[in-house]
Amino acid sequence: MTSPKSRLPLQLTIITFGRLLFNTGWRVVYPFAPAFARGLGVPLADVYHLIALRNFTGFLSPLFSPLSARYGRRVTMAGALLFFALGCAIVFIWPAYWPFGLTLAVIALAKVIYDPAMQAYVGDNVPYAKRGRAISITELSWAGALLLGAPAVGLLIRTMGWQAPFVWLAVLAGITAVFLWRILPPTKGRADTRGSDLRDVWRVVRHNRVIWAAMLFTTLIMASNELLFIVFGGWLEFNFGLNLLALGFSASLIGGAEVLGEIFSGWSVDRFGKRPVVIITGALNVAAGLLLPFTSFSLPLALAAYFLLFLFFEITVVGSIPLLTEIVPSARTVVMSSVLAASALGRAAGAWAGPALYSEVGFVGNGIAAAVLMTLAVLVLAYGIREA
C-alpha cells in the first residue's frame, strides 16, 4: 500500500498544475489587455477598470475560509476548479464587455477559494523545516502562467480569436478537478482547530496582531508590484511597438525571472531563514524599482531591469508564504485567507493608481511609488512578523 508521504510529490504536482490554470486566467489579462480591448470593441482604459474591479473580489477570501476547515481541503480545491471552469465559459457563451468582467470576477473568486486551501494542505502535510521547498514548488505555477501560459494565450488569440484561451482553460480545469479528486486523499472537515465559521474567523483575526501585520505587509508588496505590472502590456506595446507574440514572449521573460526566484527561494529560505532572505530581497526589489523607469530608451535594458524587479519580488513573496503559514498554526486557512484578502486590497489599489500615475507623471512616478511601498513592507516584516 502506498504511504501518504510517498504520494506527496504526485499530490504537489496536481495541485500545482491546478494553480497554474488559475494563475494563467488571472495574469494573462495584463499583457494582452490591448488584444482583449480590441476584441470587445472598447477603449483599453475600460479593460484596466475591469482588472481593478476584479481585484476587489479578493476581499471575499475570508468569507470562504470556513469551507476548507468545514468540508476539507480536497473538496474545496476540486470545487474551486469546477467553479473556475464555469467562469471561463461565460465569456465564450456571451462575448461582451460585462460578461468578460464577470468571467474575470469568477476566476478571481475561484482563485481565492483554491489558494488558501492549497497552502493549508501543504502546511498540514509538510514540516516547517522543509515547507519553503514545497511552497516554492507550488509557486512555480505563478511564473508558469507567464512562462508557459502567456505564449500559449498569444498563439490562441492570434489563431482562434480572443475568446479561445478561456475555452481551453475551462476544459483543462474540469479534467484537473477529476485528477485532483482521485489523487488527493479524503480530508475530514475541521482540519483547523479554529476558523470553521465566520464568527470564529473574525475572533482569530481580532485577537492576533501578527495577522494584521501580515495583512499590511501583503497589501504593501502587492500594491508595489501592481503599480508597475498594470501598465506592463500597454507600456511595451506603445513604447516599443511589440506585437501579440512579442508581448507573450516578453511576458515569458518575466516568467523566467519568477521561476528563478521560486527556485532560489526554495533553496535558500529553509537554509538561511525565511525572514532574513525576505528582508534582503525586498530591499533589492526597491533598488530595481527605482532603476526601471530610467530604462525606457532601450528595450533590452528595460527588460533586464524588469527581470531583476520580478526576480527579487518573487523571492520576497514566495519566501514569505511558509513564514505566514506558521504565524498562527492552529488557524492556517484563516491566516492565508486574510492574507489573500490583503493581497486583493494591494492589487486593487495598485490597479487603480497605476494607470492614473502613469498618465499624469509617467513611468518614473510608478517606479518611485512602488519603491516606497516595498520599503514600508520590509519594515513591517522586520519589526512585526515572526513565527509562532
Image: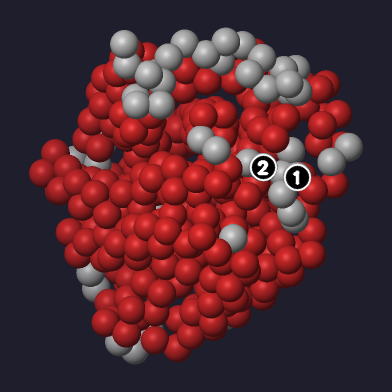
The residue shown at (17%, 43%) is: 156
Among numbered discs 1 and 2, the one appearing first in the sequence: 2
Q: Amino acid at mark 1?
A: Ala
Q: Are marks 1 and 2 in contact (CB under 8 Å)?
A: yes
Return the mark for residue 307.
Answer: none
Q: Say if 122 sits above or below 156 in the image.
A: above
**Relative horizontal placement of residue 274, taking residue 313 as reference (left or right):** right
Residue 311 position within the rendered picture, expressed as x and y whole percent measured from the top left:
42, 67
Q: Secondary structure at mark 2?
A: loop
Q: Say if 188 sits above or below 36 in the image.
A: above
Residue under circle 2? 326
Distance Cα–Cα, label 1 vs label 2:
6 Å
Residue under circle 1? 388
The residue shown at (69%, 57%) is: 217
Residue 246 position within the rendered picture, expressed as x and y whole percent measured from the top left:
20, 64
The residue shown at (52%, 20%) is: 73
* The N terminus - image quarter: top left
The residue shown at (88%, 37%) is: 207
